[in-house]
Amino acid sequence: MGVVSVTTADEYTKLISSSRLSVAIFSADWAEQCKQVADVAADLAGKPEYADVQFLSVPAEDLSEISLKHQIEAVPTVIFFRGGSAVDRIDGVDIAAFTAK
């Protein structure tokens, strides 16, 4: 399925409310370390074993109301959702933890 680029708050709410596991990656274009996390997400999204997981790219600054709601203080931040509820979180670049979760 690939990584879905979220462009609106409504789209974000709809996507994370899915019964599927949603992995929301909050990032900013200017932050180099966000590219590492985005590359890993794109790689994982293309693997058959993660076909039931939806990966979301969320521009932290463009969707600031969502970032504030989830207390995003630095990018990248990855939040795992199921049915609209956050079930786990990784602040910063931790590729090993990201792939393990």
Image (spheres, rainbow, N blue to C red):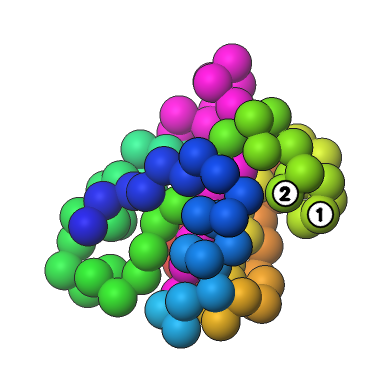
Q: Which residues are magenta?
A: 21-36
Q: Amino acid at mark 2?
A: Ile
Position of 13 relative to 33 (above/below): below
Position of 24 relative to 88 (above/below): above
Residue 96 placement (x, y as % from top left): 49, 55
Q: Amino acid at mark 1?
A: Lys
Q: Nearer the viewer, residue 11 or 86?
A: 11
Q: Using the rendered image of the protein, determine whether residue 48 is visible from the camera's viewpoint.
A: yes
Q: Residue at x 56, y 44 (%)?
A: 8
Residue 69's disc is 1
> The residue tagged with tag 2: helix, strand or loop?
helix
34 relative position to 79: left or right = left
Compute the Cα span from label 2 to label 1.
5 Å
**Figure quadrant of residue 60:** top right
Residue 82 placement (x, y as % from top left): 55, 79
Residue 68 placement (x, y as % from top left): 82, 46
Q: Nearer the viewer, residue 21 or 62?
A: 62
Q: Residue at x 50, y 40 (%)?
A: 7
Q: Using the rendered image of the protein, determine whether residue 95 is visible from the camera's viewpoint.
A: no
Q: Nearer the viewer, residue 47 or 21?
A: 21
Q: Residue at x 78, y 55 (%)?
A: 70
Badge 1: residue crowd in 10 Å (few <14, some 14–19, many ≥20)? few
* Residue 26 belongs to the span the image colors magenta: yes
Badge 2: residue crowd in 10 Å (few <14, some 14–19, many ≥20)? some
Residue 66's disc is 2
Residue 31 placement (x, y as % from top left): 60, 21
* Cβ–Cβ under 8 Å for marks 2 and 1: yes
Q: Residue at x 45, y 29 (%)?
A: 35
Looking at the rendered image, the quarter that the N terminus falls into is bottom left
* Residue 89 belongs to the span the image colors magenta: no
